[in-house]
Amino acid sequence: MHILMATAEALGHCTSDLVVNRSTLHRLREEHRRKETQRIQESFIDKLSDTQAMVVHWDGKVLPDLIGKIKVERIAVLVSYNGESKFLGAPKLISATGENIATAVFDTLSKWNILDRVEGMSFDTTSTNTGPTNGACAQLQRMLGRNLLTLPCRHHILEIYLRSVFDLHFKVTQAPEVSIFERFAKAWPNIDTSSFKSGLDCEDIKSHISDGICNDIKQFCHSQLQKTFVRADYEEFLRLVLTCTLDVKGDIFLENISFS
């Protein structure tokens, strides 16, 4: 502060008009952030129509705290409406219980003054969210005093089907990690990835793949790539499928494939 004051004085400024106290600067920054938040919220509400319905989305994530080196649970809350989305905040949770999640979502919606506009909710399918009594969805509806349209995450729903198929063909495990995948991940650094063969070189795989199936896969991927993707992971998956789709002679099919 002594250096700042001396520099300001040398440059001809009136030091009595300058605010250099750290506590004062901190209070001014807090006040500025409060006013800016209020301005953003008001401008957001002004752009909405009177009958604008919304879907609230939330998901939790463990992140490093802004102060210190500890990690904390935060829940990202956003709303979607009329093809658009708005991030509302990422409040910190003491613990990721259904009650705490519902309270965080409710308080965030209340701060933005859009409680009466929410008609649906999108969430992952963990028991913390979907519990019939203490889940975040049930408690949020009780807080709002009305039922909402439930839109569980399609990724998590498809994981349930995929897990059933996996359990049918592999040994069922209760461990958080699948041992065969763990062993493969550990062995990967020692695998020569510069030399490999396609699946058609394996008779077991080749016997299950016909020319018609390959052509159907190619046509399906090309038709889907003509659409607009909200999520880039679907587009990437289709392009990877096309990259690895083999033609009748076993050559890699790379026609009209481009990656960003």
Image: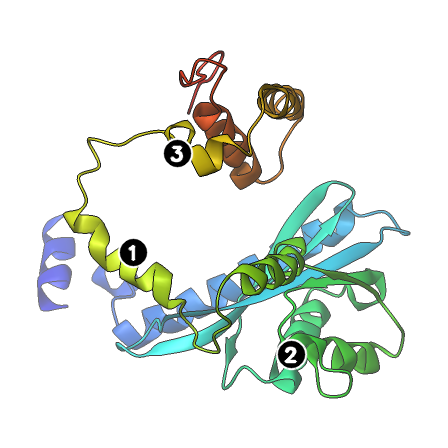
> Earlier along the polypeptide chain: callout 1 or callout 3?
1
Q: Position of residue 238 (x, y in %)?
A: 54, 31
| Mark 2 element type | helix
- Along the line of sight, which residue is nearer the eye, 7 or 178? 178
Task: Identify which amino acid the numbered label 1 is placed on.
Answer: Phe
Q: CA distance from mark 1 to mark 3?
A: 19 Å
Q: Position of residue 61 (x, y in %)?
A: 47, 68
Q: Residue at x 70, y 82 (%)?
A: 135
Q: Residue at x 28, y 62 (%)?
A: 183
Q: Position of residue 68 (x, y in %)?
A: 27, 78
Q: Are marks 1 and 2 in contact (CB under 8 Å)?
A: no
- Along the line of sight, which residue is nearer the eye, 185 or 80? 185
**Residue 252, image quadrant:** top left
Kindly identify which numbered label has been placed on residue 202: 3
Q: Residue at x 61, y 24 (%)?
A: 225
Is residue 202 shown above or below 215? below
Q: Are marks 1 and 3 in contact (CB under 8 Å)?
A: no
Quadrant housing the N terminus: bottom left
> Earlier along the polypeptide chain: callout 1 or callout 2?
2
- Tag nearer the camera, 3 or 2: 3
Evaluate whether residue 247 shows in this view: yes
Q: Position of residue 236 (x, y in %)?
A: 49, 34
Give the residue pinned by disc 2: 127
Task: Identify which amino acid the numbered label 2 is placed on.
Answer: Ser
Give the residue pinned by disc 1: 184
139 sits to left or right of 58: right
Is residue 141 shown above or below 169? below
- Along the line of sight, which residue is nearer the eye, 82 or 51? 82
Is residue 217 shown above or below 31? above
